[in-house]
Amino acid sequence: MTINLREIKRKVEDVKPEPVDIKHKFSVLIPLIKIDGKVNIVYEKRAHTLRNQPGEISFPGGRIEKNETPRDAAVRETCEELLINKRDIEVYSESDFLINPASAIIYSFIGEIKKDFYDIVPSKDEVEEIFAVPLEFFIKTKPKSYINKISYKRAKDFPYELIPNGRNYKFKRGKEETLFYEYEDKIIWGFTAKMTKNFIDKII
């Protein structure tokens, strides 16, 4: 097979850069809402019947479907989970994204829900309950932080003989910070806590 430079240029010049080795793509909305004149962040408690992360606290969101943009996925999932309309959501901007050790990328968007919080009745198939936390709480409260070491277990047949120093090769070791917020009887942790703090850091 022979490929010339012109053909290579044609194939790569309009390619959008993507992170390597990503197997799953998700997108969430960080939803803001006014309650009694104060800005709150809305969270979901996932239904216990769900296969993945049942009972955990999260932002509205989910898997990005084929030919769907991260923004569209965040809005669609929010509508499906909170049973609201697209016109009830104003997306302010795209925020930061996270790539986790499970080969997944998670995009996030910041937006406003233009609906009375107490009129929102979420889908019971996906959401056990929703609750709102005043923005002021996060501005005044630092999350608890725990640093975890990440290591990899090599395959039994890993070809150490093909790399410099063999079994003595100095593989990189990673660290991951896990955050926890405790609000009343709710525990906001993991990715949701990390993206909450990231958002708060941007606005104060």
Image (tube, rainbow, N blue to C red):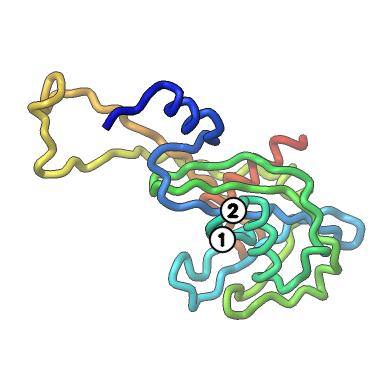
Viewer-side residue, 12 vs 159: 12
Q: Residues within 10 Å of mark 2 (few under 14, many from 20)?
A: many
CA separation, marks 2 and 1? 6 Å
Horizontally, residue 191 falls left or right of residue 94, namely left
Instruction: Return the mark for residue 5.
Output: none
Viewer-side residue, 69 vs 89: 69
Q: Which residue lies at the image location 60% right of the left edge and 55% below the top edge?
A: 68
Instruction: Inspect the image, locate mark 2, and give the three-letter code of the amino acid beneath it.
Output: Ser
Viewer-side residue, 116 vs 197: 116
Q: Which residue lies at the image location 32% right of the left edge and 31% below the top edge?
A: 173
Quadrant that contains the C terminus: top right
Q: Which residue lies at the image location 41% right of the left edge and 37% below the top edge?
A: 20
Mark 1 = which residue?
62
- Disc with the residue nearer the chain's start (2 vs 1): 2
Horizontally, residue 134 falls left or right of residue 123, namely right
Please state the horizontal and vertical placement of residue 61, each as a whole percent of the image.
61, 60
Q: Secondary structure at mark 1?
A: strand
Q: CB of mark 2 within 8 Å of CB of mark 1?
A: yes
Mark 2 = which residue?
27
Horizontally, residue 80 falls left or right of residue 89, namely left
* Relative vertical location of residue 92 with respect to residue 175 in this rendering, above or below: below
* Relative vertical location of residue 130 with respect to residue 188 in this rendering, above or below: below
Q: Which residue lies at the image location 41% right of the left edge and 50% below the top edge?
A: 23
Viewer-side residue, 176 vs 62: 62
- Quadrant location of residue 75? bottom right
Please state the horizontal and vertical placement of residue 16, each as a whole percent of the image.
55, 36
Instruction: Inspect the image, locate mark 1, and give the three-letter code of the amino acid beneath it.
Output: Gly
Please state the horizontal and vertical placement of residue 87, each as a whole percent of the image.
83, 63
* Relative vertical location of residue 123 with respect to residue 24 in this rendering, above or below: below
